[in-house]
Image (spheres, coloured by chain):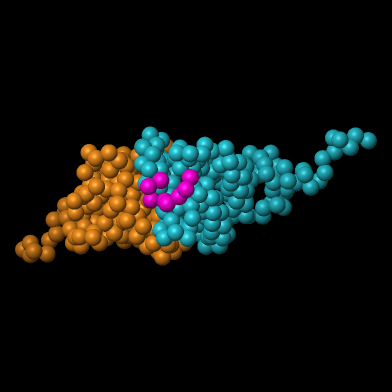
Chain colours: A cyan, B orange
Amino acid sequence: MTTSTRVPQEERTRVMRARLLEATVDCLVERGFAGTSTTLVSERAGVSRGAQLHHFPTKNDLVVAAVEHLTEKRGRELAEAAAKLPRGEKHTRAVLQMLADHFTEPVFSAALELWVAARTDETLLAAVSPLELRVGRETHRMTVELLGVDETKPGARELVQATLDLVRGLGLANTITDDAKRRERILDRWADVLDDMLDREI
Amino acid sequence: MTTSTRVPQEERTRVMRARLLEATVDCLVERGFAGTSTTLVSERAGVSRGAQLHHFPTKNDLVVAAVEHLTEKRGRELAEAAAKLPRGEKHTRAVLQMLADHFTEPVFSAALELWVAARTDETLLAAVSPLELRVGRETHRMTVELLGVDETKPGARELVQATLDLVRGLGLANTITDDAKRRERILDRWADVLDDMLDREI
């Protein structure tokens, strides 16, 4: 018996699901929501149609799970990267860079495809809304922590929210143009504003 | 001869084009890019297929012209509204409200559909890119004027850009949720930031 080469069923399932979800995000990024189909995804992931349909019966199940999966994965990577950020006077700028990078990555394009499709698709909307809420809260919480903000101070919470809306806007601006240079200068300026306006002890 | 009831051909064409373009925007807003077709638009506008195809041979021609048409129309309305804004200490906040309203209107959803579709469609991208550039410049110019910003001062230009990226981000946040209350508080705070950081004589 070579038990070492036998992968438990549970692990095989987990790997297969991850492969399906990553293929879905790739599909959304490359072809958009309308160009993504369950057939295309199962081909791309090298997973049989039967297995794919068993785990994700509809396209909506697949795309929502995919964006959720990638967002959580990226969230964990972000938290790890955050722990390594420089302290001191460059800290705010480094946090902004990390956030802006997050909102200009391919997973942002996949999420954008989902949000926009959900706008005109009630079934999809019902699945996407709670995900958006949860991701939004989690990103806010992390940003508060990263920037060392005391949200009990008047106006502090709104500055954190504005920061996230700003990077979301920068993400959108980057969707069809390479906006990196302009973005750099805006983030430099915004870091100054935050350091001025947020009354913190760094 | 009843010349008064005869509408010149040129005027009839102009009206018909406007009807087609407005029907296209309605279609984009209600059904999204994928759900918009030239057949649907000509039915909705009450314009014959032949006439529609004569003026806009492809779906791409139609959607790009439609978003351009509506953006220009809204730009003119914005400029008129801007002239009536209150002066004095409430001015900055009023300008922000106007901009945020602009980015949460249906025409923003139509533009968003177009931007996102262009991301994965080269032909559409080639038509949308110059439009985005032009609209972006025009909106920037108008915002500088409205906020009374002297862009030769260091960091002033970047604050105007950040303001527009913020309202774009707020527009996106409002796409699938009604975000009005949160937006109010963020704009209040942003107005304080601008009044603090922009060294202006109002």
Q: Please, which residue is most extreme toward the left here? A: B1
Left or right of A32: which side holds B65? left
Q: Is residue A201 magenta?
A: yes
Residue A182 location in percent, x, y?
Answer: 36, 37
- For residue B30, above or below residue A193: below
Which residue is found at the position 7% from the left and 62% from the top?
B3
Q: Nearer the viewer, residue A70 or A184?
A: A184
User: Which secondary structure type mostly characterizes the magenta part of the structure?
Assistant: loop
Left or right of A75: which side holds B175? left
Location of the N terminus of chain A (image quadrant)? top right
- For residue A37, above or below residue B180: above
- For residue B82, above or below residue A147: below
Q: Nearer the viewer, residue A185 or A18?
A: A185
Q: Is residue B156 magenta?
A: no
Please tell me how many numbered marks the rendered image carries.
Answer: 0
Residue B97 location in percent, x, y?
Answer: 31, 60
Q: Nearer the viewer, residue A47 or B93?
A: B93
- For residue A189, above or below residue B73: above
Q: Nearer the viewer, residue A123 or A110?
A: A110
Which residue is found at the position 75% from the left and 46% from the top?
A13
Which residue is found at the position 28% from the left and 53% from the top?
B195
Q: Is residue A23 visible?
A: yes
Left or right of B89: which side holds B121? right
Q: Please, which residue is most extreme toward the front here? A: A201
Residue A171 location in percent, x, y?
Answer: 44, 44
Q: Is residue A165 visible?
A: no
Bounds of the magenta segment? A195-202
Residue A2: name its quadrant: top right
Which residue is found at the position 67% from the left and 44% from the top?
A18
Residue B199 location in percent, x, y?
Answer: 24, 47
Q: Please, which residue is most extreme toward the right here? A: A1
